[in-house]
Image (cartoon, rainbow, N blue to C red):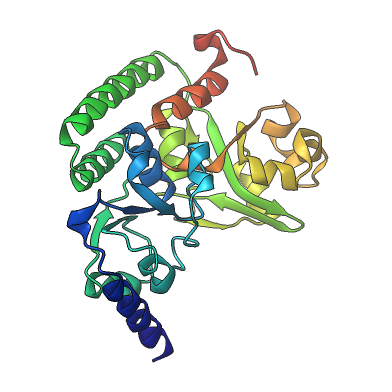
Amino acid sequence: MLVAAGVLAVLAVLAASGVRAADRPERVVAIGGAVTEIVHALDRMDALVAVDSTSTYPPEATTLPDVGYMRRLSAEPIIALAPDRVIAMADAGPPVVFEQLREAGIAVTRVPDRSSPGGVLEKVRVVAGALGVEGRGRRLVARLSADFAALRRRVADTRTRPTVLTLIAAGPGNLMAAGRGTSAEGIVRLAGGRGAVTAYSGFRPLSAEAVIAASPDWLLLTRRALDALEGREGVRAHPVLGATPAARQGRVVSMDALLLLGFGPRTPAAAGRLAERLHPASSGGDR
């Protein structure tokens, strides 16, 4: 009841202001780091009035009002911004918030989230359509399609498919690892690798025994996870990770979490960087 009353109060204030969407350019709230990246790639950052806490790129996104974490949203602060449209990833929530936004007369566009090249292109088409810039969307889709095709050709020339253990969080006795069907597994495959964890789906804590049994060729960590372990030296000194073939041979890669897992316009570049590390012989890079 308190939430509903709060929403009604905000609506009353907006109605009293007399502001109509037809009197000004459309105001948009982006929910999800990939959504904000696509808005940026479509050159429509001028339409944004707020973003969520996962929207850390481009840098100017962090100067906009933050409506909170995408899976724990509240309707009131969004409605208070008087947006015309909210563009949100499909897994944003809770669902009741989007019901309240629609009841407030705010258009809501939900963006499907598939961790694949086709999924990235679908996101672009949906966001471009919501923003009314379909032509820009087609051009971005064409560019990204070419980038993904070039990446596929490059990876096809490699002879090995190294196993990669992806950690999104780390701490004393807590290693949060990616399993099957995750965005982490998706980008590892794009880069010509294989996920080291196949016993479960999603992201879960991994036991010491499971880490040793996985015997990964490479360790892939978000920057936050690497910082929590106090850098590469901390990985090598870790009682569990340090015993893996990856740590013993210095095969540790770190990447920004949104770049790594977001599956947005920067994904071809992120997968390409990872491929250079996984396949140094074919790329001319080093470990």
Instruction: Tell me if I can see residue 148 in this picture.
Output: yes
Question: Residue placed at 49% from the left, 10% from the top?
Answer: 282
Q: Nearer the viewer, residue 71 or 277?
A: 71
Judge left or right: residue 204 versus residue 150.
right
Identify the residue at the far bottom of this view: 1
Judge left or right: residue 220 versus residue 121.
right
Q: Reply above or below: 170 against 232.
A: below
Identify the residue at the far top of this view: 284
* Residue 200 placement (x, y as % from top left): 47, 56
Figure quadrant of the N terminus: bottom left
Q: Nearer the viewer, residue 97 or 286?
A: 97
The total of numbered circles placed on residues is 0
Question: Residue placed at 74% from the left, 48% from the top?
Answer: 228
Q: Reply above or below: 41 against 152.
A: below
* Residue 187 placement (x, y as % from top left): 44, 35
Question: Residue placed at 34% from the left, 40% from the top?
Answer: 39
Q: Reply above or below: 281 against 274.
A: above
